[in-house]
Image (cartoon, rainbow, N blue to C red):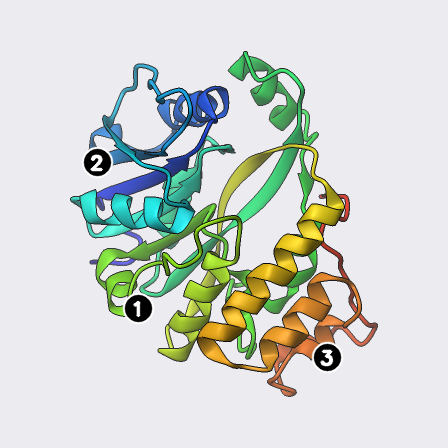
Amino acid sequence: MIEGDYFMKISVIITTYNQQQQTDLVLQSLNEQKKIDLSHIEVIVVDDGSFMTYEPIETHFKLVVIHQVNAGRAAARNKGIQAATHDILIFVDGDRVVDEQFIYHYMTQYKEGLNIGRVKEIYSRDLSDYKLIKEKIIRNQARMPAYIYHTSILYDQCGLSDSGIIWITTFSGNMCISKKLIEKAGLFNESFENWGFEHFELGYRLHQLNVPFFQVDAVNYHLAHARDLNELEKNIRDSISHFMALHHDLILEKLQAFLLGTLALQDLEINKKANWLKDHSEAIYTKAGERGVAK
C-alpha cells in the first residue's frame, strides 16, 4: 500500500444499535464525500441486534448490511472486519456524521499504523433532516469533546507523538488501520459486551506491539445526546475494572483517576521526556461528561 494513494480501496465499518435516524444521517454524509471516487469504497453496516431491524437508505457506494444478535460493539466491529474485502479499514460509529472530505483525508494522510481522526460533537434535537445537521457544521456550531481537546496535545502539529500513553487517544468512532495490522493485534476484545473501553484496550495492545499512532485531519461529528453522569462514572469504573483484570497494569488505575478528574494528564504520562510536556507545564485535568470546547 502506497501512503497517500488517492485510489486506495477502503472498507468503512459502521456499527449501529437502535440508531436508525442517526445512521441514516451518517450514510447521507458518506454519499456526499468530495475528491474521491465512491466506487473505491465499500460501507459495511453492522446492526448489533436493534429492536427494530436497521433498514438503510439508498447510497452511491457499495453497501453491505449485516444483522447480528446483540453482542456488543466489539463483536459488531469484528463482524465488520471479517466481512471487509479491502485492506484499509475506517471505523465510524452509527451516530457520527462525517465531514465531506473525511475519506479524502484518510486516503491522503494514511500511514501504516493506527490513524486517529478528529472528533467533534453537534447538539441537535431534530435528527430528521441532514440539511439541518450540515448547516450546523457550516456555521461552525460543533464543539470538541473535552477529553479529545485535552488529549490531542499528545500529538505535535505534524500528527506525530512520542508519548508513552498515546494509546489513550484511541477512538473507534473515528480511526483507520490496515486489516492485517488489527488482525495481528487480535481484533477488538469481545469480552467488553456492554458500554466500555474496548477501543482503549485495543489501542493498549497495539501500543504494546510498537505500532505507531498518527493524528490525521479526518473529522466526524458525534450527534451528542444527554448522559446520566452517575451512570457514566459507574460505567467507567466497571470498564477499568475489566481492563485491569485483562492486563494487570497500574497505569489503568491512573487512567481512571484522569477520567474522573482527580489526576493531571502530566501525571498520567509515563515518558517524562515526551515533547508535549515541554509546552504544557500547567496541570491539565478533564472529567468524563465535561461539556465540549468550542474549537
The residue drawn where x is 67% and y is 67% is 256
Residue at numbered disc 3: 267
Q: Position of residue 279 (x, y in %)?
A: 74, 74
Sequence-wise, which precedes: disc 1 or disc 3? Answer: 1
**Dot 2: few (<14), some (14–19), or many (≥20) neighbours within 10 Å?**
some
Seen in the picture, residue 17 relative to 112 is either above or below; the reply is above
- Which amino acid, by three-letter code, is at mark 1? Ala
Q: Earlier in the sequence, mark 3 or mark 2?
A: 2
Quick check: can you spot residue 196? yes
Amino acid type shown at disc 3: Asp
Task: Report the residue that reaches farthest toward the left.
Answer: 85
Find disc 1 in the rendering and name its residue. Answer: 185
Please state which of the two labelled residues, at mark 2 or mark 1, is closer to the viewer: 1
Q: Earlier in the sequence, mark 2 or mark 1?
A: 2
Reply above or below: 127 against 255: above
Label 3 vs label 2, nearer the camera:
3
Quadrant where the N terminus sits is bottom left
Numbered mark located on residue 253 in the image:
none
Up/down of 192 relative to 8, above or below: below
Q: Between 65 and 294, which is closer to the camera in this rendering?
A: 65
Name the element at disc 1.
Answer: helix
Gap between marks 2 and 1 measured at Cα: 26 Å
Residue type at mark 2: give it: His
Is the residue 144 above or below the residue 185 in the image? above
What is the C-alpha distance between the residues marked 1 and 3?
28 Å
Residue 40, numbered label: 2
Element at label 2: helix
